[in-house]
Image (cartoon, rainbow, N blue to C red):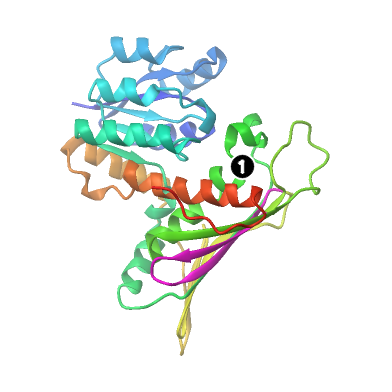
Amino acid sequence: MPVRVGFIGTGLVAQLHLANLARMEDVEIAALCDISPEALARTQRLYGGRTYTDHREMLERERLDCVYLCLPPFAHTGQEFAVIERGIPLFIEKPVALDLAYGRRVARAIEERGLLATVGYHWRYYDTVDRVRALLEARTVGLVLGTWLGGIWRAPWWIDKAKSGGQIVEQATHLFDLARYLVGEIVAVSGLGYRGLVTDVPGYTLDDATTVNLRFASGAIGTISATSALGRGGRVGLHLIGRHLSIEITPTLLRIGDAEKVVEYAPQTPPMEREDAAWIQAVRTGDPRGLRSTYRDALRTLAATLAATRSLEQNGAWLTPEE
């Protein structure tokens, strides 16, 4: 029997998951829900499935084996609870919310139901990151340097901080999450922001540049800097430093240097492809061991990025991420 998949939200990120699922055997894209009839029509032409503009109606009418929730941060208004109440395994794209209290309620509901659920932090699924995790079992990292230097994401809500949460919460969250995954929990943050670079985009309310200092439970320190002011010439990645150890992780390359040599590795499989394959396998078997981000764990990343964003507004005050 094919795994029957439903989508709530069919925007840009959903399209990446849909393309992966469409290439898998024994997976049926059964139902699509979006508030935009135009978006639904475009997606249905590509992937099939019955269409709905109300997620409650979709969940009532369809027999689904799992649901992908691919919504902008501001648009989480209870859809998770409707899925959880029906006991349907749930894949949620990051960030999981803009409000920790809302996220805690979702986490409790998932845990009380014993529901299979995961969050789309796809950097964890790079095969190059697997190599780094194995290496760090016997090595110590003391310094973490992250950069997300790019341009404005093309979704119209992204430039409105009230809707996206800002670049730290919506985009650089991948670096905060990867740092947690590789180095350990972030226990304190201090951030500064700058505005004045992007003056030509109506409705733009983001910080143009940010830098956030981090302290980890291990004692390691770090900085993650981000900007959305660029057109071309950007850079995205995480650099880990230890004694005679340099690890540079980017979407296209892993570079590891030690006291004797530098070795480079290219990712062999797109991480979202691995992520979607792991999710479908978990849905088929009920075994979550191949999943790399629980909802509760993703909440810790959200807490770190929300604390960093609050610190920007408090002139760099050191803050502890809330649980």
Residue 106 visible to the viewer: yes
Counting from the top left corner in percent of width and height, residue 239 is at 52, 69
- Mark 1 is surrounded, within 10 Å at the Cα level, by few (under 14), some (14 to 19) or many (20 or more) other residues, namely many
Counting from the top left corner in percent of width and height, residue 261 is at 47, 86
Counting from the top left corner in percent of width and height, residue 28 is at 30, 25
- 45 up-or-down from 252: above or below: above
| Residue at the spot 31% in from the left edge and 23% down from the top edge | 83
| Residue at the spot 36% in from the left edge and 26% down from the top edge | 80
Q: Nearer the viewer, residue 187 or 255?
A: 187
* Residue farthest along the right direction in this orientation: 200
Question: Can you identify the residue that label 1 sits on?
Answer: 166
| Residue at the spot 62% in from the left edge and 33% down from the top edge | 162
| Residue at the spot 60% in from the left edge and 52% down from the top edge | 311
Q: Nearer the viewer, residue 172 or 300?
A: 300
- 187 up-or-down from 80: above or below: below
* Residue farthest along the bottom direction in this orientation: 260
Q: Quadrant of the N terminus?
A: top left
Residue 173 visible to the viewer: no
Give yes or no for residue 181 being in the magenta stretch.
Answer: no
Q: Which corner quadrant of the image does residue 4 belong to?
A: top left
Q: Name the dominant secondary structure of the magenta segment.
A: strand
Q: Which corner quadrant of the image does residue 181 belong to?
A: bottom left
Q: Nearer the viewer, residue 322 or 236?
A: 322
Q: Start and end of the magenta stretch?
A: 210-228
Amino acid on which disc 1 is placed: Gly
Q: Nearer the viewer, residue 258 or 127?
A: 258
Kind of element beneath mark 1? loop
Give yes or no for residue 221 being in the magenta stretch.
Answer: yes
Left or right: residue 83 compared with residue 51: left
Counting from the top left corner in percent of width and height, residue 52 is at 42, 12
